């Protein structure tokens, strides 16, 4: 990366490139202040910390002594104390925004923000945009619907805060969004990776070449597709742009930003504390080893999360990155969830690994997977959707796909061809894998 590119890709360069020692000093100061706040005024954490023997603020080097927080706890608290639970540090009148999780894997969680904590959330998106090379004056098309999902609102307002023209795609069909893009000439697209591919597919059906719409940067959130190499390449090929992965959570914040090295998202460690732990033992893993990312947000004192078990598996490193940031790097993004791994005849595999294989084949427009029980053995059935293939071409594709899955992952799935347009397209999180044996839970 050139010096000009490097200097232009920071929102707060003095923080993003600070030596680790300075960064940890900043975290320690903010961490102590957060603990003081919740011990004084937050019923949920005051009770939780005191029960764990933490009656007063401690330093960051004692973080591991604090108890974990789980989503199950948060859901139970909100059900017991509807509608917002007890994880509130301020009087209810102090909160001015309400968002909620998608609820794709269970009960939606509601989250409140004060004007101050919401401003911090929006600022986090400025880090995301600058990391990807977005500049003031860019036109940012946000292809999400207006709704309780936080991604549209924070991404839209983040673009405004950075000095971009923020263009809403809310309340429009896919076709209407494409027409708007052709007329308004946005330079940045923000949407889920699945929807980026859906937009491109719809554009081609409208005799419109997405690569000629002028998008130079696309930023993708809501699911891990942009961190999957073949999916990223597919998006970049369709749009003629550079695709960047962003990771965040409604209840946590926009914690991940990908730099122009495109090796995976960095954790914004000015706003968050990241731990990388063995999901079974809770002990730290070595640099670069796979572990669960456990997060503490320092910027959302109104409804904080301390040592939050995300369930997301990563391979993180704090070795220097070519971009100059000292933030931890999640190599390859979110690799899967600790509870997402599926086992097929003794082979453990994450859905993202299967997607990475399927997206290598441009003939595959969409797909779904299901684990079924055949003769007391689990079998993976993949439904793939293609356009315009003859029977002979389908048979050839089937052999190639199964061969690649066997070579790379030691899987031999059953492949079924679905009629064109029959598999669902998603604007928000896409749920492509069904595991009925797990109480009907769907994996995305």
Image (cartoon, helix red, strand yellow):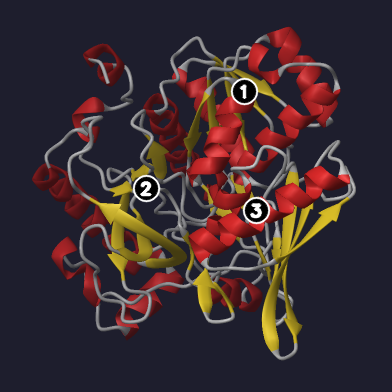
Q: Name the residue under label 2.
A: 299
Q: How many labels does the image show?
A: 3
Query: Cα distance, mark 1 to mark 3?
Result: 25 Å
Q: Position of residue 108 (x, y in %)?
A: 67, 63
Q: In this view, does 54 lie to the left or right of 414?
A: left
Query: Cα distance, mark 3 to mark 2?
Result: 46 Å
Q: Which of marks 1 and 3 is in front?
A: 3
Q: Nearer the viewer, mark 1 or mark 2?
A: 1
Q: Please determine whether, in this image, residue 334 is positioned above or below residue 53.
A: above
Q: Looking at the rendered structure, which numbered label has been put on residue 401?
A: 3
**Extreme-bottom residue of the structure:** 376
Which residue is painted at 57% across and 20% down in the image? 240
Quadrant in which the C terminus appears? bottom right
Q: Mark 1 points at which residue?
A: 239
| Dot 1 or dot 2, earlier in sequence | 1
Image quadrant of residue 431?
bottom right
């Amino acid at each position: 990366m050139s010096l000009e590119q490097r200097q232009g890709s920071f929102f707060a360069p003095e923080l993003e490139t600070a030596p680790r020692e300075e960064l940890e000093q900043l975290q320690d100061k903010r961490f102590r202040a957060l603990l003081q706040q919740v011990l004084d005024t937050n019923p949920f954490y005051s009770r939780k910390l005191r029960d764990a023997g933490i009656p007063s603020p401690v330093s960051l080097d004692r973080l591991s002594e604090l108890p974990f927080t789980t989503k199950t706890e948060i859901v139970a608290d909100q059900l017991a104390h509807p509608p917002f639970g007890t994880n509130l540090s301020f009087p209810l009148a102090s909160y001015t925004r309400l968002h909620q999780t998608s609820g794709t894997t269970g009960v939606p969680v509601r989250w409140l923000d004060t004007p101050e904590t919401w401003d911090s959330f929006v600022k986090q998106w400025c880090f995301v945009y600058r990391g990807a090379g977005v500049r003031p004056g860019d036109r940012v098309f946000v292809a999400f619907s207006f709704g309780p999902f936080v991604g549209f609102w924070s991404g839209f307002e983040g673009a405004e805060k950075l000095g971009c023209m923020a263009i809403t795609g809310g309340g429009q069909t896919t076709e209407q969004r494409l027409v708007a893009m052709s007329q308004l000439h946005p330079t940045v697209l923000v949407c889920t990776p699945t929807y980026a591919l859906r937009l491109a597919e719809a554009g081609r059906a409208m005799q419109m070449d997405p690569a000629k719409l002028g998008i130079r940067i696309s930023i993708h959130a809501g699911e891990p597709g942009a961190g999957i190499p073949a999916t990223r390449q597919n998006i970049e090929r369709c749009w003629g742009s550079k695709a960047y992965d962003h990771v965040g959570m409604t209840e946590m914040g926009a914690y991940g930003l990908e730099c122009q090295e495109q090796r995976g998202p960095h954790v914004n460690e000015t706003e968050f504390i990241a731990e990388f732990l063995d999901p079974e033992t809770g002990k730290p893993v070595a640099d670069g080893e796979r572990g669960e990312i456990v997060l503490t947000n320092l910027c959302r004192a109104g409804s904080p999360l301390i040592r939050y078990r995300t369930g997301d598996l990563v391979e993180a490193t704090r070795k220097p990155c070519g971009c100059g940031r000292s933030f931890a790097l999640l190599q390859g993004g979110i690799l899967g969830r600790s509870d997402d791994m599926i086992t097929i005849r003794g082979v453990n595999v994450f859905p993202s690994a299967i997607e990475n294989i399927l997206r290598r084949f441009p003939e595959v427009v969409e797909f779904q997977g299901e684990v079924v029980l055949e003769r007391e053995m689990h079998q993976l059935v993949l439904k793939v959707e293609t356009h315009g293939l003859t029977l002979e071409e389908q048979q050839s594709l089937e052999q190639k796909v199964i061969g690649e899955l066997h070579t790379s992952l030691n899987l031999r799935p059953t492949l079924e061809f679905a009629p064109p347009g029959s598999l669902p397209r998603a604007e928000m999180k896409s749920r492509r894998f069904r595991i009925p044996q797990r109480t009907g839970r769907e994996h995305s």
